[in-house]
Image (spheres, helix red, strand yellow):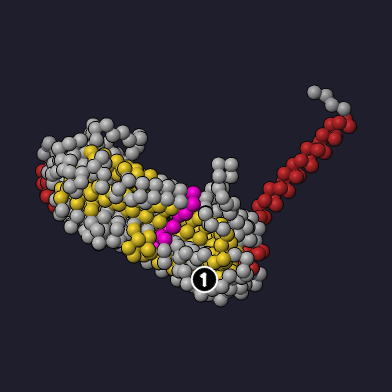
Amino acid sequence: MNLSGGLAEELGVMKTQFFQWILFFCAATGLQAQVRTVPSPECPSIQSAIANSINGDTVVVNPGTYFENINFLGKAITVRSTNPDDPNVVAATIINGSTPADINNASVVMFNHGEGNNSVLTGFTITGGSGTWVAIAWRYYTVYWNRCGGAIVCYNLSQPTITKNRITGNLAGEGGGIYVYGNPVNPVSPSNPPIHLQPMITNNTIENNSAIVNHGFSPPNSDYEVHNHGDGGAIVCFQGVDPQIIDNTIQNNHADWYGGGIHLRQWSNGLIQNNDIVSNNSTLGGGIHVTYESSPAIDKNIIKDCITEGGGGGGIYVYYYSGPVITKNYILNNQDYYSGGIAVYWGSNVTISNNVLMYNKGPAIKFNSTSTGSVMNNTIAYNTKSGKSAGILCDSNTSPLISSNIIAYTSEGYGIESADPSTIIQFNDLWQNTLGNYNPTIGDRTGTNGNISADPNFADPNDFHIMPFSPCVDAGNPAASFPPGSLDIDGEPRIFNSRVDIGADEMHLIAADFNTDGIVNLDDLLVFCDEWLSNTPPLQADLAGNGVVDLSDLAVFSDSWLKESAWRIVP
């Protein structure tokens, strides 16, 4: 194409200017991501470094104790210690919020400018906080003052990333450790749905925090009444908050009322996964409390040694039309008068599957007040009395499906106790429950609808796994269907043969279990050593399939041994 000289020159200038603009933009973008060190002459404090930062910056804080109450100011920045992956650095890099400039804003860290997941707090010990007054719209109530988030408070649609911190020694009226407030619009309706936030709360240790009613602080003015209820010793997610609470240790926290560990309320869903939730206490829901139409996935957690004071749900409490899916958890040695393991109340509809509930004091699972759901493929054993006792307790006007569970060795109680003779009970194994396998109201169901009563053949009292000769193998509901990729409590395929097993564990034969007793132990090691020395076919110990027994087979054998050892539960 031939262009006139003037037009060609003009296009050339435009092209040059365009590339100059691109280079300027790239250079400017490169300058945005700066590292600001604390302390330094330019940034003597963490807050000064935040104030000087722009989106994309990183604030790196050297070890030391910083008496500050910091605010992210809406910035998409990372504020971190020098090495969040080093526990010693985390322990030595302390933000202490015990001397706030404004006692009404005494959380150690505040997110209240709509921060997103790219606002990151990581690698600190966070302590000494006493919460911030926030006007909260409670469902069915008016707006109240609440003292929120002893260590960390998030509101005004903030959803930050909080990871690899130790959060300890904080208190508030709501959320002793962390408080996240979602959509403030109330009431919610189909035309006015909540905005669902997704804060990331991962890999933290949250311990020794408290949510208490009488914390001793007064609100900033008389605009609203005070309604501190004492919920969420470690974490509160309130009104349209779908948190990702993953890989945390949540221990020794206290709440006066709801959720010694975690409290999810009002249309809050999300994921609670792979956490150790241990030795927390409250009045309701010692480990986790879920209420007001909230439906999180509660998956692969250890919920252990949590206690409630007679209200219900030592491990998990579910209330008011909530629908959590509770799968593949170890719920062990929790305590409550009415329900040591899981309590399901007031119209809630839950899925409880592939869990191990053992050594709890009080009924392992209780349904009350028009609640329903399904209880399928759980192992419920060695639960004892704390006021009441049962493997599964169903009060009047409840209608759960109870299918393919092992319910055994309940002390001072029935295996299944129900007020409704029409309760659907099928393909379960009930064995040696002290008062009987079934209460007189529903009658003995053994021999009907696939229910059996036989020794489930656990490996031993501290190991819930069934042996290859267990009557529970291939004895679950033959019509049960599972989505592709469904797993049992061990993360193994849920159906191994043509039919699901009864209980949380699907029996999988292990190649290294040469005597097929269900355990890889010294007996199998002797076989392995004999065949390694002889190398005479046929070789059971040729686990790598290379025709000889050698180091490659030893690696496979060792992996099987370690896996079996990890199965054991200490009550």
Q: Say what secondary structure mark 1 lies in.
A: loop
**Seen in the image, is 383 located left or right of residue 272?**
left
Q: Given the image, on which type of amino acid does mark 1 rest?
A: Ser
| Residues drawn in magenta | 258-269
In the rendered image, which quarter contains the N terminus? top right
Number of dots carrying numbers: 1
Rendered location of residue 166, percent (x, y):
45, 65
**Seen in the image, is 76 located left or right of residue 339?**
right
Q: Is residue 101 above or below residue 375?
A: below
* Few, some or many residues within 10 Å of mark 1 (<14, 14–19, 20+): many
Find disc 1 in the rendering and name its residue.
Answer: 130
Between 30 and 502, the residue placed more toward the observer is 502
Report whether residue 539 is seen: yes
Q: Is residue 120 above or below residue 540?
A: below
Rendered location of residue 157, percent (x, y):
58, 54
- Give the prevailing secondary structure in the magenta stretch: loop
Between 269 and 319, the residue placed more toward the observer is 319
Q: Is residue 31 above or below residue 168?
A: above
User: Residue at 56% of width from left, 70% of height from top?
Assistant: 106
Report whether residue 325 is seen: no
Residue 20 placement: quadrant: top right
In the rendered image, which quarter contains the C terminus? bottom left
Between 48 and 541, the residue placed more toward the observer is 48
As for residue 528 lying within the magenta part, the answer is no
User: Residue at 36% of width from left, 46% of height from top?
Assistant: 370
Rendered location of residue 529, percent (x, y):
13, 48
Rendered location of residue 250, percent (x, y):
39, 61
User: Residue at 15% of width from left, 50% of height from top?
Assistant: 436
